[in-house]
Amino acid sequence: MITAIYHCSIKIISRGKGKSAVAAAAYRSGEKLLNDYDGMLHDFTKKGGVVHTEILLPKNAPREFSDRSTLWNAVEKIEKSKNAQLAREIEIALPNELSEAECIALAKNFAQRTFVDKGMCADVCIHNPSREQENIHAHIMLTMRPFNENGTWGEKQKKEYILDKNGEKIYDKRKRTYKCKSVPTTDWNYRDKAEEWRKAWSDFLNSALEQRDISERVSHLSFERQGKIEKPTIHLGVSATQMERKGIFTVKGDINRKIKAENDRIHYLMKQLKAADEKIAMLKEIPKEESLVDMLLRYWDNGKKFAEVRGHSISNLKKIEKFKDVAHAVAFLQVNHIATISQLKTKSVDTKATLQNVKAEFIPKLSRITELEELLNNYDRYKLNKAVYEKWQSIENPKKKQRFYDEHYGEITLYQTAKNFFKNRMNGGKLTQKAWKSELEELKKSSAMDKAKISKLEDDIAVLETIAVNVERLENYEEKQKSHEKKRSAELE
């Protein structure tokens, strides 16, 4: 089964966050590199799983930058600021449907045409799927400065004077200088670039799948922007993926299993609705003097005749079940005031729209419920272990501090993990346990009501399909009967 996936993440490697371009390049390439900036040696030669590495250079870049150590040490040297942005990284999932050689060629072509041709150096490293992630994937590290024509580094931005309405420079008396602003020398940091690059990767990937006559297609758009009502799965990450592959269930894995189950239910429901739509669309409009209810009752009356035509009898049990289906369908038509095929078609369209609307409200609630549960779980760890952590921090004697740490390693680790979680998630915001609990309770009640609506819609879709099938069979049967009658009349004449 074809299961092409789309993954394209973009992030910045920044010195301000304690990162190093040399260290990142060493890890992704599985090499040993010395960082001249801080004197640290980064050795990842035992990492394994790296199947291809290559540096692609734009036309103005020095040829010696084809050496990984030379390139990234040059980046570390030119960036003077303690919080400098050193490199941009693009991580893409490559399709398992292609061979390893085809994946390498695809990643290189994407990097060359999307980034290198625009003036960036690209360090392309392909990782084997048997290692960190389930799918073969590529890390593309990119330089963030343009090159001058003579091969030297260009500026990331330049100063530009602010002019008045007459085109004259404006003097700032307080600062005793002319007013100016910083203008980027490239568009690489523009907000819409990420969207452009993510779309470019989906285009490259779809083109590669099309060339192999693979019908599967991917999109860089979120499910919501694609108009899909399914909930996307979450990214597992390296640790969780490795545990899941060893048969160890993780929290993230459990979340994805729940999401997949919900998505499977959605796909099945939409498939049933589509099937019902197609059957209804093929039905002939009925005469004004009869209704769909009349046809269904006539279908029930002819049940025995249908069986005789097929050459078998209908058991009492089957008769009971069939009568229940017909009775349910008749009640559905009467309650919804449906008498004609046109009205049945309208009901099918309305059912689909209602399902879309319910799902559109239901899915974000599920996502928020998961988020709130994660917040509350981390809050419990944070609150329960805070005193132990603070006591450990207050101990000044190194030996006593180490002994206390060894005795309370679990509590301290749980607190630190929760603290880091809130630091990354809340951005300094307040921890509002009471408000989270209240919101979670309301969302669970609301989502339960949504599930009830979905179940009702599932019943409606089943009835729509039943009606369409029964009317179709009745029409076929009655047409055959008419044909037989004409044939007999012709023979008698």
Image: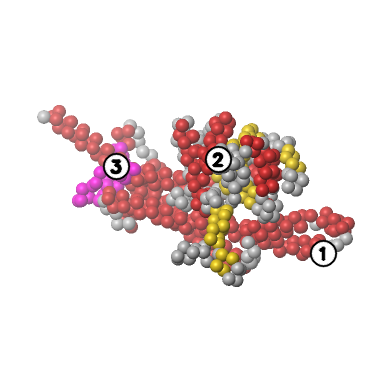
Q: Is residue 297 magenta?
A: yes
Report x, y in % for residue 275: 37, 43
What residue is at 61 percent from the left and 68 percent from the top? 175
Quarter containing the C terminus: top left
Q: Quadrant of residue 66?
A: top right
Viewer-nearest residue: 457 or 98: 98
In terms of sequence position, does the residue under pointer 1 or pointer 3 come before the other? 3
Residue 131 located left or right of residue 306: right
Amino acid bearing label 3: Met
Mark 3: few/some/many CA within 10 Å (<14, 14-19, 20+)? few
Magenta region, main secondary structure: helix
Q: Is residue 440 visible?
A: yes
In terms of sequence position, does the residue under pointer 2 or pointer 3 come before the other? 2
Amino acid bearing label 2: Val
Viewer-nearest residue: 50 or 149: 149
Give the extent of the magenta segment.
Answer: 278-306
Residue 72 located left or right of residue 445: right
Q: Label 1 to label 3, Cα distance in Å?
A: 78 Å
Query: Mark on residue 116?
Result: 2
Q: Which residue is mark 3?
A: 282
- The relative height of residue 165 versus residue 488 in the rendered view (above or below) is below
Q: Which residue is mark 1?
A: 394
Q: Label 2 to label 1, Cα distance in Å?
A: 52 Å
Report x, y in % for residue 306: 30, 37
Secondary element type, mark 3? helix
What residue is at 41 percent from the left and 45 percent from the top? 272
Report x, y in % for residue 431: 64, 65
Residues at circles 2 and 1 in contact by the CB criterion of under 8 Å: no
As drawn, the residue found furthest toward the bottom would be 174
Mark 1: few/some/many CA within 10 Å (<14, 14-19, 20+)? few
- The relative height of residue 3 versus residue 435 in the rendered view (above or below) is above
Q: Is residue 242 visible?
A: no
